[in-house]
Amino acid sequence: MPLVAALCELEQSGDTGELKVWNHFEERAAGFFALGRTVASGAACAVVTTSGTAVAELLPAVIEAHYQRRPLVVISADRPAEFRGSGAPQAIEQVGIYGNYVSGSEDVSWSDVIDLLAGWDGVNPWHLNICVEESDLGSLSDNPRLSKVRIAAVEQARQDIDMRPAIEVIADAWRGLVVMLGGLEPEDREEVWHFLRDLGVPVLADSTSGLREVLGKLVIQDGDRILKNQPPANVLRIGEVPVGRFWRDLEEMTDVNVVSLSRTGFAGLARTSKVITGNVSRLVRALGNVSHAGDSQDYLKIAKRPGGKITELLESFPESEPGMVRTLSVMATMGTSLYLGNSLPIREWNDFAQLDVPYELVRANRGANGIDGQIASWLGATANAEDAWGVFGDLTALYDLSAPALLGQVECRGRMLVVINNGGGKIFERLPAVQNLNRETSDLVVNTHTHSFRDWASMWGMNYVCVRGMEGFDFEPEDQTTVVEVIPDAGQTKAFWQAWETI
Ligand SMILES: Cc1ncc(C[n+]2csc(CCOP(=O)(O)OP(=O)(O)O)c2C)c(N)n1
């Protein structure tokens, strides 16, 4: 209560112009919403909680922030330190609860709350645990002196970065070089686009790179399979860890030389590879002018045939899940931003979405690839934006049923919340090991269900549209949030994948 009161007082006084308070009764969604805010604003966002398991609810968002390297701060209220280990009400071991997922934490009492962010790097998650005495609760006028702090320089200018691994991989392009493009920060896109256009090597581009639709002829369609059959000698990864299957296959292909240019510094592979860490634009600029390397292994030529076949399949099975994703991808060009939920939505978007019209902004939570907190993260990342589109799997949406409690605090004009309801975690049905299970066991793995999202939409005052066939795609964005429940035809989906295997 004193923390909330202090924040509201500050927000209302207008002394700290940039401070904005949101609220949610449920900490897990609040954590992911805050994460979304850090993504959209580039600035820190703190979640303030009471003591006890409330603090534990934030662990998934803190983990995601750690792997995405986002400045998510947890400010947890705690019972006074002498309660630790006592089993007293709402007293749990809060100190250290986030383990290595925070870059540091402070454990303090109410009267000490001054300059506690001094040790924080301003880049990674951080935990501030504040013990509050019963007597503090009555003395609201003694609010801690929350004041603006200047966070240590976020990233020092690093002249000393060794770019040689990337330079060598480019020089070796004549033996085969493919760029795998993961998610990029919006400000890095232009620099990377110029670099790739100059280099001219084939690119496997994730939707979250924001460049998938603008690289034109450089993008390899069906690249996962083509590269598996004929691996290049070199892979240059730029941005986040790529989503596609070929990145996982690289784990075993230890003779393929892999170099990553990464903001977060995570290799994304357990095998040997080289990672150059830093601001991606700056790293690309440090490579200087590159000469045109082209497509020495003819990947783009090889990809033409399967690319055409896939288009044919999407047209033959328009109500299959990939077919409906394609249609949705055309409609979503109306939006100002796109958020892709994990599991099949992000994969099917990468593989089957339209390639002609770029999306202004594409986001996803790819730190730990969780299906939790996705709707809340999307709301946080688009809190001030009209015409925001988010596409989620059904289990993913079921995980985050409380997230719409935030809708009253965010921009909802034109907001489109798409749930692709295929009746479970259908990504697992694509695995051969699961296909060999008996029905009962596979239903357990897939979490098969028959729930609809109609009543959920109604509970939170959202519009609802159900899309069962192609004719269902004639909905329009409204002034309030619309839930679009897309139900692919299971038979067409099966037929699509069977035909796809034979391409
Ligand atoms: C928090 C969390 N729990 C479990 C998983 C494992 N998992 C990955 S994908 C998936 C299924 C997701 O189902 P759904 O959202 O319906 O998407 P679909 O696979 O049908 O596209 C699960 C359970 C995870 N990634 N994150």
Image (cartoon, grey):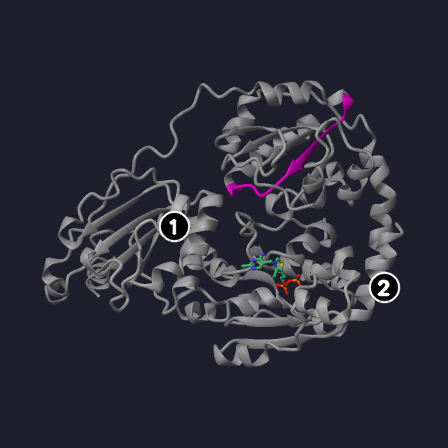
Which percent across, then down, holds residue 218?
A: 74, 36
Residue 161, percent from left and from top: 48, 21
Q: Nearer the viewer, residue 174 or 126?
A: 126
Q: Residue furthest front?
A: 86
| Location of ligand 1 given as a quarter of the image | bottom right
> Which quadrant of the figure contains the N terminus?
bottom left
Is the residue marked by circle 2 packed among few (<14), some (14-19), or many (20+) residues within 10 Å?
some
Asked whether mark 1 lies closer than 8 Å to ligand 1, one says no
Question: Is residue 184 rendered magenta in the image?
Answer: yes
Residue type at tag 1: Tyr
Q: Residue at x 74, y 69 (%)?
A: 488
Residue that badge 2 annotates: 495
Amino acid type of the residue that numbered disc 2 sits on in the rendered structure:
Ala
Mark 1 closeness class: few <14, some 14–19, many ≥20 residues within 10 Å: many
CB at disc 2 and ligand 1 closer than 8 Å:
no
Find residue 331 and report its horizontal and vertical position in percent: 67, 62
SS of the residue at dot 2?
A: helix
Residue for point 45% across, 64% down: 411
Mark found first going from the N terminus, 2 or 1 = 1
Specify start and end residues of the magenta stretch as a single range: 175-186
Is any part of residue 489 visible from this angle? no
Q: Which residue is mark 1?
A: 98
Is residue 209 among the parts visible in the rendering?
yes
